[in-house]
Image (cartoon, rainbow, N blue to C red):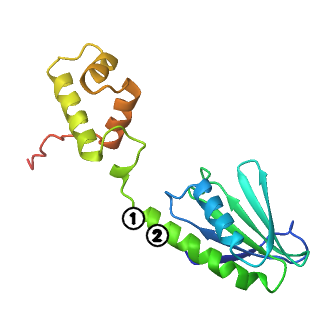
Amino acid sequence: MTKPSTTYEPDMVNDAATQEYRLAARVTIQDVDQEVGLTLAGLPCDFERRERGHAVTYLIRWDSAELGRLVIAPPTRIFPFVRVREVKLGPEFEAMCTPIRLALDLLSRTAEQVGVEESSRFSYPRPKRRQIVEEYRAARRNGEIENKETWAECQYHICRKTLWRYECEFPEEETLPPVSNS
């Protein structure tokens, strides 16, 4: 987790200070939502969870007085990671956020340690994906492939689009002709 940056949003109640925390790229909004909910359940406060679009907001209260909000924003094209904003409305809110920040920091560090090859997103681990691409390119160079879809399905039980994704993951090295100094 990166160091928080303090910003001020004019649409918040009065002069509510907002701090934003960015999590590791592999952390999903569902992971953050679950972690925040579990941590808040163990704290001596009342909270209400609201969803608006893909964002989740937790309103945190103490003795019916709202102390602050936690807003979990999903990844976007501009910000490719989940962000958690703390909107502080009361002085007790800072202390209440400390265990939440610690839980999110642990979640972020754990996610960074998980390798791409262990992801369930792919049918095969990374070394096998590289091998599939190399075999496909060799067969294509030898003229053994009439239909990419058929080859991918028969050889590895994957579709053409999956093979294309594997090819994008392992781009072909371009071989340039040697440069002469004459």
For label 2, the SS is helix
Q: Tell me, for residue 109, which label it has, or none.
A: 2
Q: Position of residue 17 (x, y in %)?
A: 79, 78
Residue 136: give x, y in percent of width and height: 22, 28
Q: Position of residue 39 (x, y in %)?
A: 65, 71
Q: Position of residue 145 (x, y in %)?
A: 22, 17
As drawn, 100 above or below 134: below
Q: Is residue 71 above or below residue 106?
A: above
Q: Is residue 39 above or below residue 170?
A: below
At x 43%, y 42%, the residue is: 121
Q: What's the residue type where badge 1 is placed?
A: Gln
Give left or right: position of 121 versus 28.
left
Tell me the CA gap for discs 2 and 1: 7 Å
Say which residue appears at 53% left-offset and 58% top-offset: 27
Q: Is residue 163 left or right of residue 108?
A: left
**Residue situated in front as seen by the camera: 29 or 85:** 29
Q: Residue at x 81, y 74 (%)?
A: 68
Answer yes or no: do the residues labelled 2 and 1 have beta carbons within 8 Å?
A: yes
Q: Mark 2 belongs to which amino acid?
A: Arg
Q: Which residue position holds label 1?
A: 113
Q: Residue furthest top?
A: 146
Mark 2 nearby-residue class (10 Å; few <14, some 14–19, many ≥20):
some
- Tell me, yes or no, if residue 56 can be seen here: yes
Front one among 147 and 97: 97
In the figure, residue 8 lies in which quadrant? bottom right
Q: Quadrant of residue 3?
A: bottom right
